[in-house]
Amino acid sequence: MVRVSGARGRKVFQNGEPEAGIWSAGLAQGLVDDIPTVRDLVHRIVAEADALISGRLAAVCGA
């Protein structure tokens, strides 16, 4: 019987050694289609929030 302690795999996260073991990732990884800069990401989030808020506010105010 083979037992896995995870000691080798922890190096991936503790030491930043991507070749040391298994990476864990969730289902959301399939939703990533670009890797923007932080600046671009913040601008995108603000623009999407503004559009969402404006749209909902218009619906509530009957505009």
Image (cartoon, rainbow, N blue to C red):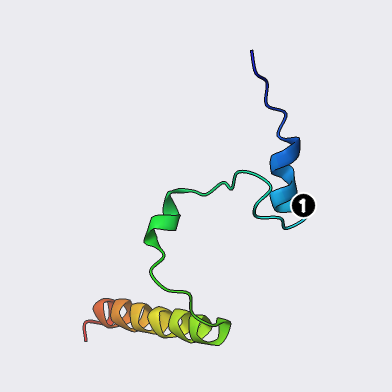
Q: Residue at x 38, y 79 (%)?
A: 53
Q: Residue at x 42, y 73 (%)?
A: 34
Front residue of 51/14: it is 14
Relative height, residue 30 to residue 53 (above, below): above
Element on which disc 1 rests: helix
| Quadrant the N terminus occupies | top right
Front residue of 29/59: it is 29
| Quadrant the C terminus occupies | bottom left
Q: Quadrant of residue 17?
A: bottom right
Q: How many marks?
A: 1
Residue 26: x %, y % from top left: 48, 48
Front residue of 13/62: it is 13
Q: Residue furthest top?
A: 1
Side (left or right) of 10 relative to 57: right
Side (left or right) of 63 relative to 3: left
Residue 11: x %, y % from top left: 74, 48
Side (left or right) of 63 relative to 38: left
Q: Residue at x 73, y 39 (%)?
A: 8
Residue 7: x %, y % from top left: 76, 36
Disc 1 marks a residue whose amino acid type is Gln
Relative height, residue 26 to residue 3 (above, below): below
Residue 47: x %, y % from top left: 41, 85
Pointer 1 local density, CA inside 10 Å: few below 14, some 14–19, many at least 20: few
Q: Which residue is mark 1?
A: 14
